[in-house]
Image (tube, rainbow, N blue to C red):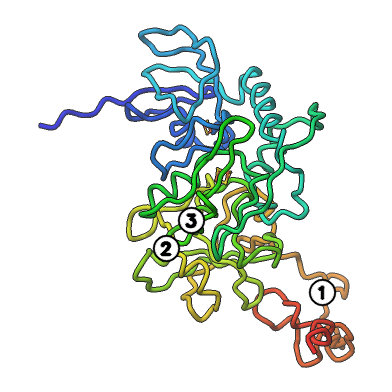
């Protein structure tokens, strides 16, 4: 008869959960979800050995275990600390944690440029969310920020090292998903930078995934850069038969146009497991070369779980405003509705904006037509 596995009881912010021995505090908190879960800028559950670099996930251990209930003297990195039976953890209920986290945000922003208005990652940047939620107004830093030249890492990826927070996720991705890693962290301390050795390009089949794991705008997709703000695009789930990867992606569309292809993400911003099993990493061909809606079978609108600005363009569970005409007309319908399409000087006359599928695109308006001539 198989022996039943003993589970550990851990209490995080007064909520108790049973977890398997060996679970980290962070993953136990993810089982509870919501605000109890510490933010994580470097840990990535699908990448072995990730975590322990950024310190955003610090928590207070108020009691180590039932056997030894002494508190831990220092705050600990929840992504690297495993739970003990009877452990009591404080995250948002600890003043020390909130203060330390504000300090970590300040450190992360010492050299990070505040260029969100022109950064492609704006709207889906974990550092942007982190600083809104845990940072303080203003900075005490008065010195020159560290800057680097922009680098093209091969045909599809742009490295903007000035924005990098040295989380190492891209290094682990290249190590664990591709068979020849040619980039890593060079130099030490203030000089440390992500670089390819003698500027070799990153051009193997799965390297595009470094863009998805990068929590900030340091690694961006050159086929999408500056084409659109992410909150103006509509994410839909789609798939295709691909011989290299699971072929399950998220298309970021505007009208019928596919602006960007990414892997599907879960509520922690990590790549989701594919329906075929294992993490749903996608290949470069699906990501960079299949930009026609006809290449894909659309499964439906993506459920956006993160409460970021990208959920603004989110059109699942939309509450439609009440039809006001019958109210205004005392229950009667209008006798005559003017057809604005025949008099509008803005859109192309042959296009009825209310009838096109999805949001209007610049091609639907007159100026873009004139400019295109
Ligand atoms: S480039 Fe992005 S993923 Fe790589 S270490 Fe820097 S922040 Fe992390
Ligand atoms: S997520 Fe734990 S140290 Fe970065």
Task: Work out whether residue 166 or residue 361 is closer to the camera in this orientation and state it.
Answer: 166
Give whichever of discs 1 and 3 has the lower sequence position. Answer: 3
Kindly state the secondary structure of the residue where label 3 is placed.
Answer: helix
Spatial distance from mark 1 to mark 3, Cα to Cα? 52 Å
Toward which corner of the image does residue 158 lie, by quadrant? Answer: bottom right
Residue 329 percent across, percent down from the top left: 87, 75
Instruction: Identify which residue is drawn at 49% across, 73% down.
Output: 298
Question: Closer to us: mark 1 or mark 3?
Answer: 3
Task: Work out whether residue 279 or residue 89 is closer to the camera in this orientation and state it.
Answer: 279
Quadrant location of the N terminus in the rendered image: top left
Quadrant location of the C terminus in the rendered image: bottom right
Instruction: Check if mark 1's residue and mark 3's residue have beta carbons within 8 Å.
Output: no
Give whichever of discs 2 and 1 has the lower sequence position. Answer: 2
Instruction: Identify which residue is drawn at 49% across, 48% down.
Output: 183
Q: Which residue is mark 1?
A: 326
Spatial distance from mark 2 to mark 3, Cα to Cα? 9 Å
Q: Is residue 171 left or right of residue 306?
A: left
Q: Which residue is mark 3?
A: 209
Q: Which residue is mark 2?
A: 205
């Amino acid at each position: 008869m198989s022996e039943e596995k003993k589970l550990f009881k851990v209490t995080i912010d007064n909520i108790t959960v049973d977890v398997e021995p060996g679970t980290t505090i962070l993953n136990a908190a993810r089982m509870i979800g919501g605000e109890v879960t510490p933010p994580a800028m470097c840990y990535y559950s699908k990448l072995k050995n990730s975590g322990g670099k950024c310190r955003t996930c610090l928590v207070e251990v108020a009691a180590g275990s039932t056997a030894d209930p002494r508190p831990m003297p220092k705050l600990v990195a929840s992504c690297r600390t495993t739970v003990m039976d009877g452990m009591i953890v404080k995250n948002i209920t600890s003043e020390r944690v909130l203060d330390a986290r504000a300090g970590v945000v300040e450190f992360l922003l010492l050299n990070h440029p505040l260029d969100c208005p022109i950064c492609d990652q704006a709207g889906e940047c974990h550092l942007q969310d982190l600083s809104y939620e845990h940072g303080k107004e203003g900075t005490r830093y008065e010195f020159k920020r560290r800057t680097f030249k922009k680098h093209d890492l091969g045909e599809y990826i742009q490295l903007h090292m000035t924005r990098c927070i040295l989380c190492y996720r891209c290094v682990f991705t290249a190590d664990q998903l591709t068979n020849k890693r040619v980039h890593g962290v060079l130099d030490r301390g203030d000089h440390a930078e992500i670089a390819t050795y003698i500027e070799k390009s990153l051009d193997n089949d799965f390297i595009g995934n470094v863009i998805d794991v990068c929590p900030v705008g340091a690694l961006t997709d050159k086929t999408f850069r500056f084409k659109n703000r992410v909150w103006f695009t509509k994410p839909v789930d789609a798939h295709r038969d691909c011989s290299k990867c699971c072929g399950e992606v998220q298309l970021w569309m505007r009208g019928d146009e596919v602006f960007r292809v990414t892997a599907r993400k879960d509520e922690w911003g990590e790549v989701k497991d594919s329906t075929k099993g294992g993490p749903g990493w996608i290949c470069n061909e699906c990501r960079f070369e299949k930009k026609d809606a006809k290449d894909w079978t659309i499964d439906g609108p993506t459920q956006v779980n993160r409460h970021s600005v990208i959920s603004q363009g989110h059109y699942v569970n939309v509450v439609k405003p009440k039809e006001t005409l019958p109210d205004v007309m005392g229950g009667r319908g209008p006798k005559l509705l003017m057809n604005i399409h025949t008099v509008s000087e803005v859109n192309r006359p042959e296009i009825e904006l209310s009838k096109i599928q999805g949001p209007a695109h610049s091609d639907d308006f007159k100026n873009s037509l004139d400019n295109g001539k």
